[in-house]
Image (cartoon, rainbow, N blue to C red):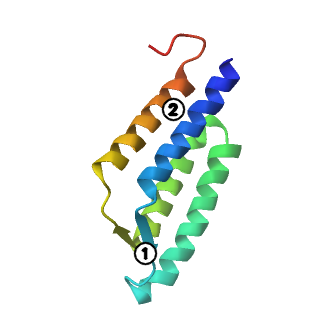
Amino acid sequence: MRFLSYILGLALILVGLYFLGKNIIFTTHAYPWWRSVAADLSVISLCIGVFALVFLPSSAKALGWVAVAFGVVCVFASSRAILNPTSLWQFFVSLTAMGFGYKMLTARGRSLY
């Protein structure tokens, strides 16, 4: 039963992210001279960060988080995010799904309420 709760919680989080993220579009025409450098830096630093988080010991995980954060900043520096209007209903459904999904993921053998 815990496995089913875990899978359902993960599915709810993904559904919430889908509803929240389907109105976000990324383009790459913001800064033409900086775009290629920042795109390369973002890919390299995200790869280093994920590698550090997965394979390095727990004492060096901070290095991985710094690399991931730098990669995310470079992604936003190399592109432009366009936020399309989101209805209040979509926002409510996405936050509710993510909230209940997170609660189902973190509830280990205890009641959800």
Viewer-proximal residue among 72 and 79: 79
Q: Nearer the viewer, residue 89 or 60?
A: 89
Which amino acid, by three-letter code, is at mark 1? Ser
Q: Secondary structure at mark 2?
A: helix
Task: Specify few, some or many for label 1: CA neighbours under 10 Å numbering under 14, 14-19, or 20 or more.
Answer: many
- Residue 93, position as x, y percentages in the image: 39, 41
Name the foreground residue: 46 vs 88: 88
Question: In the rendered view, does 81 fall on the left or right side of 1?
Answer: left
Percent of width and height locating residue 65: 51, 48
Residue 85 in percent (x, y) is at: 30, 62
Position of 13 with respect to 4 (left or right) is: left
Q: Residue at x 48, y 25 (%)?
A: 103
Residue farthest to the bottom, as pictured: 33
Q: Which residue is pictured at 42% across the width and 52% down the height? A: 20
- At 46% across and 59% down in the image, what residue appears? 22
Residue annotated with mark 1: 79
**Element carrying mark 1:** loop
- In primary-sequence order, the first of circles 1 and 2 is 1
What residue is shown with label 2? 101
Between the residue at mark 1 and the residue at mark 2, the CA separation in whole angstroms equals 30 Å
